[in-house]
Amino acid sequence: MSESFSSREGRTIVLALIKAIQDNAAYLSDIDGAIGDGDHGINMNKGFTLAEKNLSGEPVALADALDGLGDTL
């Protein structure tokens, strides 16, 4: 069975990505600490949370939602 989604669900998809980063910020920092300074999760969480604020309640195409995320990051 193949699953698909409408491009108009971009907001929902990007919000799910943002939630995943927010929920795993500590883990991302922990694994970054093994090879770096351990701030990766903190910085990703900060950027993704800022992007979340820029997504309105209106449907947004996936490409536009990802562009907004990329611009914020």
Image (cartoon, rainbow, N blue to C red):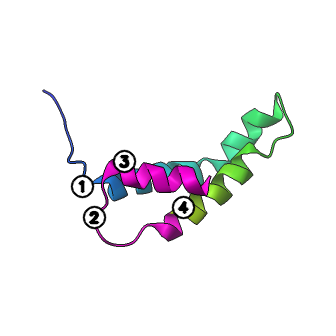
Residue at point 54% right, 61% down?
Answer: 51
Circles 4 and 2: CB atoms closer than 8 Å: no
Cβ–Cβ under 8 Å for marks 1 and 2: yes
Q: Say what amino acid the circle numbered 4 marks.
A: Ala
CA gap, disc 2 and disc 3: 12 Å
Pointer 2 local density, CA inside 10 Å: few below 14, some 14–19, many at least 20: some
Q: Position of residue 11 (x, y in %)?
A: 35, 58
Classed neighbour count for the residue bearing mark 3: other residues with Cα under 10 Å, few (<14), some (14–19), many (≥20): some
Q: Amino acid at mark 3?
A: Ala
- Mark 3 or 4: in front is 3
**Taken as a whole, is the magenta stretch helix, strand or loop?**
helix
Measured Cα–Cα span from mark 1 to mark 3? 9 Å
Residue 50 in picture, x, y percent from top left: 59, 65
The residue to which callout 3 is attached is: 63
State the residue position of label 1: 8
Q: Residue at x 48, y 56 (%)?
A: 68
Sequence order check, earlier mark of 4 and 2: 4
Amino acid type, mark 1:
Arg
Distance from disc 1 to disc 2, alpha carbons, whole Å, reads 6 Å
Give SS at disc 4: helix
The verdict on residue 68 being magenta is yes
Q: Nearer the viewer, mark 1 or mark 3?
A: 3
Magenta region: 52-73
Please give the label number shown on residue 51: 4
